[in-house]
Image: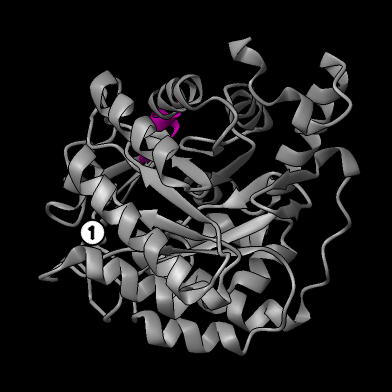
Amino acid sequence: MFDAMTGVLRLLPAEAAHRVTVRLLQAAAPLLPAPQPDDSRLAVEALGMRFPNPVGLAAGFDKDAEVPSAMLKLGFGFVECGTITPRPQSGNPKPRLFRLTEDQAVINRMGFNNRGMARAAARLAQRRPGGIVGLNIGANKDSDDRIADYARAFEALAPQAAYIAVNVSSPNTPGLRGLQSRAELERLLEALLSHRRRLQLATPLLLKIAPDLDDPAMDDIAAVLLASGMEGLIVSNTTVARPASLKSAYAKELGGLSGKPLLAPSTHVLKEMRRRLGERIVLVGVGGIASGADAYEKIRCGASLVQLYTALAYRGPGLVRSIKRELLEFLQRDGYANIRDAVGTALR
């Protein structure tokens, strides 16, 4: 049903189409059948959990944790909701979401629009258990103490989350990416890990970084992560770069670019972080995935798990089934017994 509606929804403005999609999923969720069991060769043991398959939904689609169960029923191995901030905020002025159809891409400057951590926590507390649902947290735009914002969001949401992703890489909250600098990142991660110990929680913590990083910045992030005790790294968020190859009239809009043009730069950073971190940190590869070949490339470059979002707007949820089928074909072609055996093989 949702695959057939994808083309119709694209007739609406991008943000309206997204809002309608979420409402339809809310209505349909109780009627959707449970997903077919995944082939055991796709299972991944990571972050202390068993993922039925490595294909996850990236943050940004389900900002308020309204439809995680419905998305799991569509075949995702895990779902990441958010970004969620301590207080509700409306985000940036509209229009703020643009389809670059000729480029199979999207530019967004949403600005962490969400209803806040209290609403999300209450909704998740009522959700029937089942499936892996991570939560992506951020700071309010007008916060006087962004590190305290992350700590508050972690405390409110970690009990309801399979993992917490710490978003310091959105380009749409002024100054937020400054938290990727070594000194600021050390302060932030130390505060969160101390908070986790004090609360006696075991919720895994993952950092989400930008694709627009040079070698010294990647060196610093790797050093901080290895010294910190963080469990994972998500590579990457959207990019502020604008490749010369972009054809759409919206190419010069401000915001973060996602979709096909992000595949190469995000995979480059993924590979570089794998070289720096080795196997001590779980890597999640995000950015530009629109096929099994794209997902397999991320996995071979060091990702144990992958995520997608933008391609769903163009291909519909049937894309998830297609990617899983193609991954199995690649495993058979290359002689791997399971998906875990393929992780990092491009770097050997």
Residue 181 vs 241, above or below: the answer is below
**Helix or strand or loop: what does disc 1 sit on?**
loop
Please say whether residue 266 is one of the residues in the magenta stretch. Answer: no
Choose between 278 and 112: the one closer to the eye.
Answer: 278
- The mark total stands at 1
Query: Which percent across, then down, holds residue 49?
Result: 72, 55
The structure residue drawn at horizontal position 58% and vertical position 28%, both measured from the top left corner, is 298
Dividing the picture into quarters, in which one does residue 24 lie?
bottom right
Q: Quadrant of the N terminus?
A: bottom right
Dividing the picture into quarters, in which one does residue 339 lie?
top right
What stretch of residues is rendered in magenta? Answer: 258-263
Q: Quadrant of the C terminus?
A: top right
Please say whether residue 261 is one of the residues in the magenta stretch. Answer: yes
Residue 216 vs 258, above or below: the answer is above
Residue at the limit of the structure toward the top, as seen here: 348
Query: Which percent across, then down, holds residue 82?
Result: 43, 66
Residue 344 visible in the shown view: yes
Dividing the picture into quarters, in which one does residue 335 lie?
top right
Residue 123 vs 328, above or below: the answer is below
Q: Which residue carries the number 1 mark?
A: 96
Choose between 52 and 200: the one closer to the eye.
Answer: 200
Residue 8 vs 283, above or below: the answer is below
Query: Which percent across, then down, holds residue 154?
Result: 41, 70
The structure residue drawn at horizontal position 27% and vertical position 81%, both measured from the top left corner, is 88
- Say which amino acid is labelled 1: Arg
The structure residue drawn at horizontal position 42% and vertical position 87%, both measured from the top left corner, is 119
The structure residue drawn at horizontal position 87% and vertical position 58%, both measured from the top left corner, is 36
113 left or right, relative to 47: left
302 left or right, relative to 223: right
Color theme of the render: one colour
- The kind of secondary structure the magenta stretch mainly shows is helix
Choose between 156 and 291: the one closer to the eye.
Answer: 156
